[in-house]
Structures are given as C-alpha cells and as structure tokens.
Image (cartoon, rainbow, N blue to C red):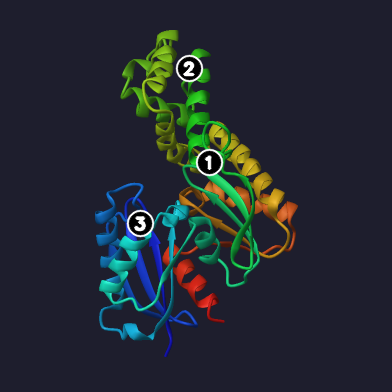
Amino acid sequence: MTYVLGLDVGGTASRALLTTLDGARVGFGRAGAGNPVAVPLADAVTQVCAAARDALSGADGTRIRAAVMGIAGAGRFTDPAIAAAFAAGFAQAGVPVAVRPVGDVDVAYAAGSTVPDGTVLICGTGAIAARIEGWELGSTADGLGWLLGDLGSGFWLGRAAATTAARELYAGRFDSPLVRRVTAALLGARPDLDGPRGPVRQDADDLVNAVHEQPPRALARLAPLVTEAAEAGDRLALSLVDDAARHLVDSACEVHAGGPVVLAGSVLRHSAPVRDAVRTLLAQRLPGTSVTLAGPGELGAARLAAATLT
C-alpha cells in the first residue's frame, strides 16, 4: 500500500491528511498556525510537524512516497534557512520523503477537481481567478490586493456595504436591513435612528469617520452582513451580491480555457447568495462547464502528491 501526505498550512491552523493513492483516508492531524510569515519560524515548524505526526500516528510512515504542503507564499521556501528548518522537522516527524511546498491557489483547485486542467476562482478577503494546467498555476486574473483589485471579494463587499450605508444615511433613509446591520456594526446601537427624525447628517458623518478610523482591510468583516441581508431579501444587499458575482465571473472567464471551474475561498464557501449568483452567471457564460466547490486544502495537497506518482 502506497501513501501520500497532504498538508494545508495557514496563518491560523495547519492540517495534515494521509491517504492512499486513490484518496482513501488513512490519518489526519491538526495543529496551530504554521506559516512563517505569520508566526516565528521555529513555532511554524513545530505546529506543521505536529499535524504531520498526528496524521502518521498508527500508520506505517515508510509507505509515504510523496508529500505536498500547500501554503501561501510558497516562494519563501527558496530561503535555505526556512527550507532546512522544515526539512529537519518533517524528518523528525517520520516523513520519509521531501515535502514539496506549493501555492494555495494550486491546492484550492486540486481540492475541487480530479483532472489536471481547469480554472479555480477564489473569493475570500481577496479574490483571484487562475488557470491551472497540468496541476500547476498558469495565467491569473485579478488577485491584485484591495487597493488595485480583488473585485467581488470579501473586502470589496464590505467596502460596498459601508458605502451604501453612508449614502442611504445621507439621504435620510434607514429602512434597509443592510443599512441597519452596517450602522450597528460600525456605530453600535442608535435607538434615535428609529425615531421620528430618522437619520441626520451627523449619523452619516459618524459612520464615515468610523470607517476611516480603522485599517482598510477591516471592512472585510462587513461582508457577512451583506449575506445576511441578501438572505432576508434586502434589495440593496441583493444588488451588491449581483455586482460581486459579475466581477468574479469576469475574472474566471478571463482565464478559462476548458475543463471544470472550482470555487474556493471563505466567501464562496459560506455565502450562499454569492455562490448561487456566481453559479448562475457561470452557467450562462460558460454553458456545459462543470462547477464544483473545493473541499479542504489538505485534500487538494494530497491529490497533488498522488499526481506526482501517476
């Protein structure tokens, strides 16, 4: 029996999955943050290797023939110090082969597809679409960060929600569930807004000032409010969802050249309104294309490891 090891390493958690070549689960491990961008190198190695050790617990690690680690900023492993620290840690954890670091985009695609060529559309705090060829990253669209792009992303939704709320308040309107949710999130409870006078210019000024007093990327925390309001049928939220979906599908179509489309990222996983709108537009613009939702990253990494042996 041949095994492969897949790891998904992030700034909050590290997960490891041991499978057979055909994907049958053998072992699983989970530990803390493992990206050396987010935590000190020694801590990162400790956590990632703890996850790997747990995945190998009770299994014959000598049967591992390939291992892949998905991690944002995989290019950092060209640094000899980082590469050597992880190699030593994996050896101590009982991994008998070199663990290949790959980007999280590659892993996201493999987590939703069993064929080597296709497209992945990722929408979390940021947004990017990528063409995958032979399991490797090809051309990309967007992924430019909040200042230059990430259109349709969680940040984009949050900023759009704040903009919409400000405009509505300046217009003296407070009847939208989206506006109410955003105002409460940024300013706290304001019972006077429901009074006879309704919102006044000071309320809108206070909301705008509250936005400017926090880091720009913090606006991404408002994205779930768009989902909640859209699910409640709010017209403003539904309009933002449609706009986000158009941006995301534009990016996917820019790089698509056949094969399936894999949807990944926290927004597409957890926001049914955005995901459904994206699926609807993809069906219109890429008829007949298979659209799937990515599974966990460690599954994608294990598939990439298996692909190197077949």
Image quadrant for the N terminus? bottom left
Q: Which residue corresponds to mark 3?
A: 82
Which disc number belongs to residue 169? 2
Pick the residue in front: 53 or 239. Answer: 53
Residue at screen point 61% across, 48% down: 277
Q: Residue 297 or 308: which is nearer the viewer?
A: 308
Q: Nearer the viewer, residue 95 or 147?
A: 95
Badge nearest the viewer, 1 or 2? 1
Mark 1 and mark 2 lie on one chain; the one further toward the N terminus is 1
SS at mark 3 in the image: helix
User: Compared to 187, does 256 lie above or below?
Assistant: below
Q: Please, what is the three-letter code of the amino acid marked with disc 1?
A: Ser
Q: Element at badge 1? A: loop
Q: CA distance from mark 3 to mark 2?
A: 51 Å
Which residue is denoted by mark 1 in the rendering?
Answer: 153
Disc 3 or 1, which lies upstream in sequence?
3
Which residue is pictured at 43% across the width and 41% down the height? 224
> Measured from the top left, where is residue 15 in percent x and y?
34, 64
285 to the left or right of 87 = right
**Type of the residue with mark 2:** Leu
* Picture quadrant where residue 33 is located: bottom left
Number of residues whose C-alpha sits closer than 10 Å to that of mark 2, classed few (under 14), some (14–19) or many (20 or more): many
Q: Nearer the viewer, residue 295 or 144?
A: 144
Q: Are marks 3 and 1 in contact (CB under 8 Å)?
A: no
